[in-house]
Structure formats: C-alpha cells, structure tokens
Image (spheres, rainbow, N blue to C red):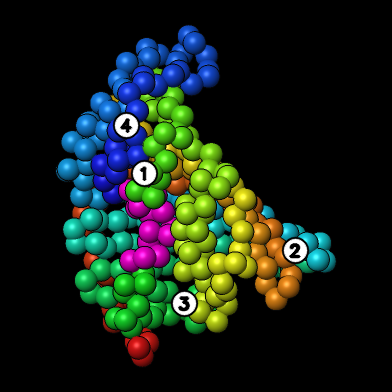
Amino acid sequence: MSTATLAIGLSACSETAEPASGDETTKGEDSKLTVQEVYEKSVEASEDITSVHADIVTDQTIAMQGDGMEMDMTVSSSMDMTIDPVAFYQKAETSVVSEDIDNSNPMSMEMYFTEQGMYMYEETMATWLKMPDASIEDLKALADQQTANPSQQLEELAEFKDDFTFKQTEAEYILTLDASGEKFNELMDQQLEKTLGQMELEAQMALEDMTIHAVNYVIYVDKESFLTTGIDMKMDMDMNIEDEMMNIKSDMQADYSRFNEIQAITVPAEVVEQAQEIAG
C-alpha cells in the first residue's frame, strides 16, 4: 500500500514536473517540487497507511487470428483491504460479449480473506465455500496480480526511473511509462509470469508461448497527501495456444481511496456457519 516504492523509481530525477495539458484558467498553480521532494513526502505519507479501498476495472479484447473470433471481457472488482494483519473483502463481476459465444449473464464472485481463513461464494451452488489453508499464500499473490496493492506495481518499475515522464495537474502528479523495446524485456517477463499465475495449472504454458508487445503505465499521486490514487495499465500481447495465435489488448484502471478509513475485516458469522469446507 505504501507509496514509498514510488521513490525508488523516481528519486534519481531532479526536474520539476511539467504541466499536463489542459485549460490554463482552471489548472491551478503548478507545483515546483522535484521528484526527489515528492519521494520524501511519499515516504512520510506511507508510514501511517493501515487500510485502503480499491476499485479495479479491466477491459480486454481477445482476437483469435485463425478463425477471426473476437471477444470483449470486462472484470469489475471492489476491494476493502487492511495492511496489518493482511485481510480483504472483495466483490467482482465478469461479463463477456461476443457474437460467437452465448453468454450474456455476468458472473459474480464474493470473497473474504482474514486470519479466519479464505471464504468464497460459489454462485452456481448458491453457497459459501471455505478454501483449504494451503491456498492462502496463492491468494496473497493473487491480490498483487489484481493490483489491489499499488506499491507492488511501483516496485516493479523501479529500475526504469529515467524513462518516466513527470507531469502535473492542479491536484495530481502524473507519471507515465511507455514500456516497449528490448530494455523492457525483464518487465515484460514479469507481466507474463503474473498472467501465468492467474491461469489454472492445466492451462499454463511456457513463457516462449507468450509475447508482450508493449505496456503503458500511468500513475497518479495526490498533491496534498502524496498517496497513489490510481494506476492505469495498458498491455498488448500475443498467446500461442496449441498453434492457435490469440491477441489480447488489456486496459486496467485501478482507483484507490478511503485510506485508513477501513476497520478490521471479519468474516460474518452466517458465512462461517454456512460454508462447506473444501479438502486441501
């Protein structure tokens, strides 16, 4: 949750942020802070963060190059998270639109993760399930993959500090990175591994079966609190599945709010009572 890792990626730069384009009469006064000063204030702001709310929307366009089939998929999720101890409550909805697939009904998901365990609502069975304890570590990793934790994304971008553009509006600092070309191969591989981590084991494939052409990041930092209020990530990639090429264009927008407003997250008693335990 900390914005401290923002500093790692930007501390080497010393230039003041350039104004972002917009109406000069409403843009407000430009800040004269350098990236180093933004860093120092971000570290200070991050020390007291105990919880955060994340709203994440991911739009994907999937195109099969062989038969020409196209599919648009949208995943919308809302999550409350506490930092210590790590716990969260999440609701998500997935919708798929395609002329080739008859699936007009969105799929819903609801989940609790606390020291009490991991509970997930199974929509088709209309019941709660208690997942095996062995899955807890995987779920923590999944939270990072879903970008519920903005510091995870920022940490991955640390070594590309000299490639950011640094602009500002009246209320925000805007940091942008266009990651394309050989120098970003390691970052591309990290994104591929994340994608693989979200797949079922039987559907996993080797990294050589996947190619990311470009990734674009836009990071928003509040001028008053110096907290990361949003991360947008766009990605263009190809996947080779059983000699069938698939192109995926993904646009993920994550907004963060309610810093330190969320109290301890607990699993409701009725969920614990109703849940069916899944064997590990």
Q: Could you tell me the amino acid type at mark 3?
A: Glu
What whole-number distance in Å separates the C-alpha atoms at marks 3 and 4?
48 Å
Residue range in magenta is: 140-154
Q: Secondary structure at mark 2?
A: strand
Q: Secondary structure at mark 1?
A: helix
Mark 4: few, some, or many residues within 10 Å (few <14, many ≥20)? few
Front tag of 2 and 4: 4
Q: Could you tell me the amino acid type at mark 2?
A: Met
Give the labeled residue for mark 2: 64
Front tag of 3 and 2: 2
Residue 158's tag is 1
Say whether residue 99 is visible. no
> Is tag 3's residue or tag 2's residue first in the polypeptide sequence?
2
Q: How many marks?
A: 4
Give the labeled residue for mark 3: 122
Residue 12's tag is 4
In the rendered view, does 95 fall on the left or right side of 194? right
Q: Secondary structure at mark 4?
A: loop
For image coordinates 45% across by 18% down, the residue present is: 19
Q: Secondary structure at mark 3?
A: strand
What whole-number distance in Å separates the C-alpha atoms at marks 1 and 2?
34 Å
Q: Hey, which quadrant is residue 256 in on the image? A: top left
